[in-house]
Amino acid sequence: MIAGVPGIGISGLFYLLSAFFMPFFELSATLRGRSSFKRWKLVTMHHFYFWGIILGSYAIIVLFEIALKHYFGIAIFPYKVDGQIPNILSIVPVVVTLSLLLTVLITARLIRIVGALISSLCASNKKYRYKR
Amino acid sequence: MKIAAQQNISALKKTIFNSETHSRIKKTRNGKLTVLVPAYNEAESIGDTIVSLQQQTFPIHEIIVIDDVSTDNTADIASLYRVRVIKPPKNTGSKAGAQNYAMQFVNTEFTMAIDADTILAHDAVEKLIEAFEDENVVAACGFVLPRHVRTVWERGRYVEYLFAFSFYKQIQDYFGKPLISSGCFSLYRTEILKENGCWSMRTLAEDMDLTWSLYQKGYGVRFIPEAVCYPIEPHNYLFMKKQLKRWSHGFVQNVRLHWKGVQKVKYLNHIITVVLWDAIIASCAYLILLPIMAILFRNPIFLIGYIIDIPAIIVPTMFVAIRRKEFIKLLISLPSFFVLRTVNAIFMIEAFWTEVVMKKTFKTYEKGH
C-alpha cells in the first residue's frame, strides 16, 4: 500500500535529498568495510535519478515560463530589475519547498524534545509527591 | 589511508568467506516455510495464486488457504490443488483475523502471507528469503505491480507502484526503514511474528501496524526489489474507493497509534513526518489552495505546482519500465496516475477529518476487487 500522496509536496524533496546524500553515506560504509558492488550500483542509480529529476524540473520550469510569456502574453514577475525581468521562477519553487521541508522536520524534532521534557517533568513530579 | 584500505579489503574477504556466514546462509535457505493465503470470495483468483506458489523455486513446506466463510466456492477450488484448506467457525471480519486464525497451525521457521489475488514471479520467495541471512531481519517484502493494467484505475496504480517501489521504497530500504512490509506479499520469522501477537486488528492497515511495531522493538525489515508479485488491483471507481478509504484511514489510525513510539526510530520518524504532511497539507494545497491562489492573484504561477513534479515521476519509472520492456505501457498510463493521485488526495483529507477532527474510527474492512 502507498501511504500519503506520492510525488507531491515535501516528501519528493526529502527523497531527492536522500538520493543526493546516498553516495556519501556509501563512501563512509566502504571505508568501514561494509559496502558491496550491489550497494554501489543502487546508490549510483539513485544519485543519477537525482540529477535527472533536477534537470527535468528545471526544464519544466523554463518551458512553463516560455509558454506563459510567449503564448499567453502573461508576465509572471511584473517587476523589472535593471531593465530585465529577473528569472526567479527557476529557484523560487525549490527554495520554498526546501524551506518548508526543513521547517516541518525541525518542528517535528522540537515537538519530540518538548514531549520528552514534559514526560520527564511529570515523572519527576510524581516521584516527588510519593516521597512526601 | 592505503594501509587502512588494504585492511578493510582483507576484513571484507574474511567476512565473505567466513564459515559462520556460510552456515547462516545455508540455514536460511534450508529454513522451512508455511504460506498463508487468506481468502474471502476469491474463487476466480485463488487457483492462480496456489499454482504460482507451487511453482516457486524455493520449496514451500505447506500452503494453508484460510477460507473466511466465503459465500462462493473458494474452498472447493482451493481443495483441488493439494493444499490445506481451513475455515474459521465464523467470518473473522478481516484479512488479519483470517491470518491470525491460521497461525495456530504454523510450526515452521518462516511464515509468508500472500493475498488470494496475488501471483508471484517464479523466484520471488527465493529472493525474499535471502533477506533473512541478516539475523536482525524479521520481515521482508517485495516489489508489487498490478497484474492487469487496462482501466484508468489500474493504470494509475501501475505508475504509482512503479514510482514508489523503484524510487521511494529503495531509498527507505537503503536507510534500513521500508515504510511498510506490504500485506499482499511479505515473509516473516514465525517466532517473532507470534511474539508480536501476529497481525493486530486495531487498525485497518495491519501490515503497517506490524511493521512499525517491529521497528519499535529494534527489529529489521527489508525490501527486496527482485522479489516481484502481481496482485489484482481495483479496476473501477467503486472498488478503488473501498481500497483507498481503507488505506487512508489505516494510515491515519496507525499514525495516531504509533506517533510516540516511532519518534525514536531514526529515519522512519522523518519518513512518517513528511508523508503525514503531504497526505494532509499538500493534499489541501493541491486541491484547494493552488487553484484559489491562481484565481485570487490572477497569476498562473501557482499552477506550476501541478506539473513541477512530472520529472520526479517520469525519471525513475522510465528506467524501470525500459528494463521491463514496458515503456509504452508507462507512457500510456502516466495521465491516469494524476487522476488517481487527485482521488487519493481527497480520501486522505477525508480520513484525517473523520479520524482526527471528528474522532470517528472507521472500522469496516472491505475488499478492493
Image (tube, rainbow, N blue to C red):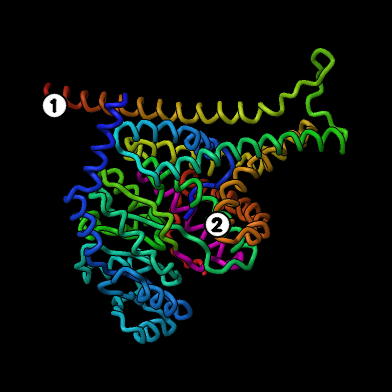
Q: Label 2 to label 1, Cα distance in Å?
A: 67 Å
Residue bearing the label numbered 2: B323
Residue range of the region highlighted in magenta in the rendering:
B229-258
Rendered view: A1 above or below A95: below
Labels 2 and 1 within one chain: no
Quarter of the image with the N terminus of chain B in it? top left
> Is B308 displayed left or right of B6 in the figure?
right
Q: Is residue B13 above or below residue B141?
A: above
Where in the figure is residue A128, as x and y percent of width and height?
A: 16, 22
Q: Tell me what residue is drawn at x 64 percent, y 43 percent.
A: B311
Which residue was labeled with disc 1?
A130
Mark 1 — on which chain does it sit? Answer: A
Q: Nearer the viewer, residue A85 or A40?
A: A40
Closer to us: B287 or A3: A3
Residue A63 visible: yes
Q: Amino acid at mark 2?
A: Arg
Residue A71 coordinates in the image, percent (x, y): 87, 38
Tell me if label 2 and label 1 are in contact, CB under 8 Å: no
